[in-house]
Image (cartoon, rainbow, N blue to C red):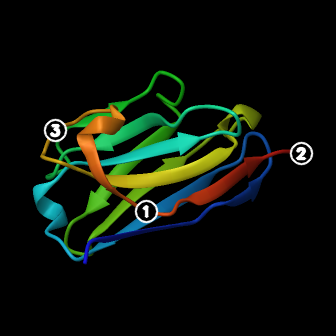
Amino acid sequence: QVQLVESGGGLVQPGGSLTLSCAASGFRMDFYAIGWFRQAPGKEREGISCISSTGTKLHYAESVKDRFTISRDNARNMVYLQMNNLRPEDTAHYYCASGRADVVSLWIGDYDYWGQGTHVTVSS
């Protein structure tokens, strides 16, 4: 059974940092791209970062570029999202998802399995 479990969310002050983790099981994660998405209240889910199966290709949305860093450890079936210099507009529910293939994409349609998400609140 394919499962993705996110963790690491919480409350952080503006300018602070958090690292989100995504634990994968039930499939060969090292064959697929993994993406991070977020959804703020009243807004559509948006792709913010993705990483190829081997970690050699990375992609970021402009809104998080130079602040967030995606990485993966295939030996541990883990993907991470290091988030620095957080802003109130980063407040959202964050999800990881596995790609349908090893395609680096921020389009929701390219992902088929999703975790339940972890919530991040950026507030003073």
Q: Residue at x 10, y 58 (%)?
A: 31
* Residue assigned mark 3: 103
The answer for how far apart the CA atoms under marks 3 and 2 are is 38 Å
Direction from residue 40 to residue 112 in the image, left or right: left
Q: Is residue 52 above or below residue 113?
A: above
Q: Is residue 77 above or below residue 98?
A: below
| Nearest to N terminus: mark 3 or mark 2 | 3
| Kind of residue at disc 1 | Gly
Q: Residue at x 26, y 33 (%)?
A: 105
SS at mark 1 in the image: loop
Q: Which mark is residue 124?
A: 2
Point out residue 64 in the picture as x, y percentages from the top left corner.
Answer: 52, 31
Which residue occupies the foreground of this view, 115 or 60?
115
Position of the C terminus by quadrant:
top right
Position of the N terminus by quadrant:
bottom left
* Residue assigned mark 1: 115
Q: Are marks 3 and 2 in contact (CB under 8 Å)?
A: no
Q: Are marks 1 and 2 in contact (CB under 8 Å)?
A: no
| Kind of residue at disc 3 | Val
The answer for how far apart the CA atoms under marks 1 and 3 are is 19 Å
Point out residue 109 in the picture as x, y percentages from the top left corner.
Answer: 29, 37
The answer for how far apart the CA atoms under marks 1 and 2 are is 28 Å
Q: Residues within 10 Å of mark 1 (few under 14, many from 20)?
A: some
3 or 2: mark nearer the eye: 3
